[in-house]
Image (cartoon, rainbow, N blue to C red):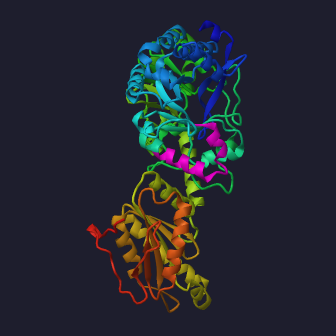
Amino acid sequence: MTGLLEDVRFAFQPLFNLYTGGVVAIEALARPASRSVYELLRDAARAGELLETDVALAASAVRAAAEHNNVVPLHVNVLAATVSKAAESIGPLLEALRETGRAPDTLWLEVGTPFSRLRRENLRNGLDLLRTSGFHVALDGVGDGDVPLALYTELAPEMIKLDRRVVAGLPTDAGKAALVQALAVIAEHNGAQLVAEGVETELQLAAVRRLGFGMAQGNLLAKAGRRPTVETTIAAALTKLPEGELTGPVRHRNGPRVTDFLHPATMLPVSATAEEVRSILAQQGVGGVVLVDENNRPLFTVDRMRFLLAVTGPYGHALHAKRDATRLADRPYVLPSDATALDLLDLLAKAERQRMNDEVVIVDAKDRCLGVVHSADVVRGIAELKVEQAASLNPLTRLPGSDALAREVDRRIAMREIFAVGWLDVDGFKQVNDSAGFAAGDDLIREIGRALADAAAVLPTVQVGHVGGDDFVFVSGLDDLVPLSSGQLDAQHAAGGLVISMSLATLVCSPGSVTDYREVSRQLAPLKKQAKALRGDSWVLGRPGSERMDVLRGGNTAPRVPPARHGAVTA
């Protein structure tokens, strides 16, 4: 095995937080001099030394990173087969951690393919052992390997790294974008971070941002180098969506999580002296220090400005240098990793005035420090979110447009829900504008928009949008479909003395019946045409793959509601 590894060197590539622009981790990449990593592992497998070689590579990566005094979390690659036999194979990696003084909870294991031939139980047991030892777990190369779909939820990785071949297709391939949207739903369900690797162009980065990624790596952001680069930041322009792409990424219902804004924490043991803290704070880019116990649980935080003010001056250094830094520290502001950005702002709103800009420590389920968040990043992130949301609203009704509805439809498809999509518009709207004037037409559109928004506010499964002109679209669960639809068609509308009727087409979608929002839109078109052909307020209902159209209202047909429990339409 020694001969297999003797020509291996390591390069280091940073992972960036796309909200803050800063480095959050470094990945160690093996670089054999005369062959690829794949060829090295292939030769090891032929020699019957695959697992030993794989763990030796990970251990070597830890030692190589230690040569550069790297303080941010380190990512190393391991095979799924190695993880499935962690009890017997992980020893050399633990030894490397002991030698270098790196804590296991600062190491991320990026678990890679193949998975298909492994016993699921062995893989789960191996991951449980590694997590008990303190390691973090990421699934690597997702989207282009043999990762069974069930593993995304069964293994509950803390990070999902999208393969570079999928990232390369995102700007132009709608199928790959749909795949990512489904992964985003799974990641949010698990509380996992979604990372794009291999970002090479600004178009790819724009697609990644639009789809809601909070982290990325690739040559566009920073190339892999012989020394870990932790001080660099992404140009501000690259952390923003370009004009025309402000469609808004997939967001959490209560806003972005605090982990979207995470910075690596600078940690020292709680026994550190003031002089040790001062030497750390003298380094560029360090805003504060977290003093932790032996398990990396935060006990105190040291704010840079308050600390330096205390130790500078003719007597400050002499008074404090050799004494415990805790004398100049504060009890930390702490939030769990599943907290939202709004939770953080609420916490700081109740803080002492002089501490409102302090770093907030984010901890995992075992109260170990994961990193810190700066309030300025959160304020900027929420402000940008509001701008993105405002840019996607129809200026007349302030309802979301097609992009928001498309994301909602695709989310429900990915979650395999039964739902309905409705397309509602005004009959003869041009006549309203021509006879009563465009101001009266605008008033009518606002009135309908308010009615839809009011209905959505009390119907929990409904999301409504204004897609342009007199066209409104909604997405609804089946229990809310009839109350919503009947309520809109029963309402009396008029403009300039004209009595207004409306046409509604609805498509009831069961799991697997449609693939995306575009297909839903296409299948709604003939239903809409049929509804417009009927007299008065009309409602036509259909299902994907069926030519049958149920006329529930309009023409010579009396209003008819299909029988269902609690007023629901059955699929």
Where is the C terminus found, in terms of image quarters? bottom left
Q: Is residue 333 visible?
A: yes
Which residue shows up at 50% across the image and 80% down it? 530
Does 453 appear above or below 22? below
Give the image quarter of residue 197: top right
Residue 87 in the figure: left or right of residue 306: left
Residue 229 in the figure: left or right of residue 395: right
Front residue of 275 and 116:
116
Does 235 appear above or below 303? below
Where is the N terminus found, in terms of image quarters? top right
Residue 126 point in image, percent of width and height: 41, 22
Q: Is residue 178 magenta?
A: yes
Does 326 appear above or below 534? above
Q: Is residue 424 magenta?
A: no
Tell me where the magenta segment starts and ends, as one range: 162-185
Residue 515 point in image, percent of width and height: 51, 57
Give the image quarter of residue 113: top right
